[in-house]
Image (spheres, rainbow, N blue to C red):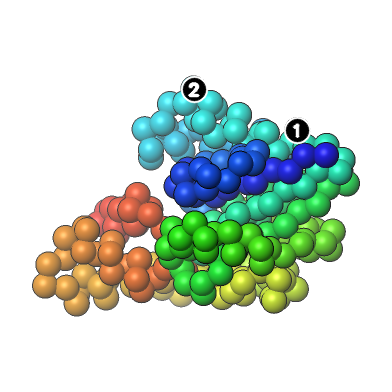
Amino acid sequence: MKKYHLLNGDCLKDQLQNLKAEKIVFRECLVEGKVQGDSLKDVLTNRIPFFEKNYQVSAAEYRQKSILEISRITEIKNGDTIYLWFENDLFCQVNFWFAIHVLFHLGKDISLFLVSPIKDTWMGFGALSYDELLQSFEQKKELTKIDQATIAHLWAAFQKSDWTELRVNAKKLSGKVNQIEEVVEAHIARFPVDKKYGRPEESIQKIIASLDDPSFSNVFRAFSQAEGIYGFGDSQVKRIMDRMEN
């Protein structure tokens, strides 16, 4: 029986370099771009054009750094344990939902635990010391088969942009996954039906109007403080702003 730590990025891997354990790094940003596909292989293969266009990552590099690495989670065996280190923001949560979807549908007898930051902040693991990361691990929550099924349904609803199913399943997870209902509402608010811009765009508009120096670095810093719930990096915010200008 083996134990794996599934980490939400290379920064966390660096923070946990002193943790002697089997680590898998989830290098993706499923919160943006197309997410079609039923299997892990289908979804990630369909992501290649997005990364080529938006991140200048070649197909070969994406296969090596993302597909091969993430696919390691399919190699787990009955009796193994996986600790999933994912933050509470939307960016990390969508990746988490997909990981659980894949693991749940393997149909194996495995134990899954969610490790969340101990501090109630959108800054996530990056704001924690090594000792605080270990405290976060000590407060991990086991995900029952029912939890896993519900999270897998969240991923399916996310793929289909089914707001009703997202809300129903998020409500079931309230108390198990921190701020899950709030995060789902923030995602839905990205796609308004009665106005031109969603919540991120409107927030950026207000920030630009309030700044004496609306340079990108200042806008991004203010957006991260105001809308940390999204967990967007500079690339995501830059693309939002570019779309607003077109």
The image shows residue 42 at horizontal and vertical percentages of: 66, 35
Viewer-nearest residue: 192 or 85: 85
Amino acid type for the residue under numbered disc 2: Ala
The disc placed on residue 112 is none
Which mark sits nearer the N-terminus, 1 or 2?
2
Viewer-nearest residue: 23 or 243: 23
The span from disc 1 to disc 2 (Cα, nearest Å) is 22 Å
Q: Nearer the viewer, mark 1 or mark 2?
A: 1
Mark 2 crowdedness (10 Å alpha carbons): few <14, some 14-19, many ≥20: few
Question: SS at mark 2?
Answer: helix
Q: Which residue is mark 2?
A: 60
The image shows residue 53 at horizontal and vertical percentages of: 39, 35
Which residue is pictured at 56% across the width and 41% down the height? 25
- Tell me if I can see residue 185 in this picture: no
- Tell me if I can see residue 53 in this picture: yes
Residue at the left extreme of this rendering: 212
Q: Which residue is mark 1?
A: 75
Q: Is residue 24 above or below residue 209?
A: above
Which residue is pictured at 60% across the width and 54% down the height? 85
Which residue is pictured at 66% across the width and 34% down the height? 71
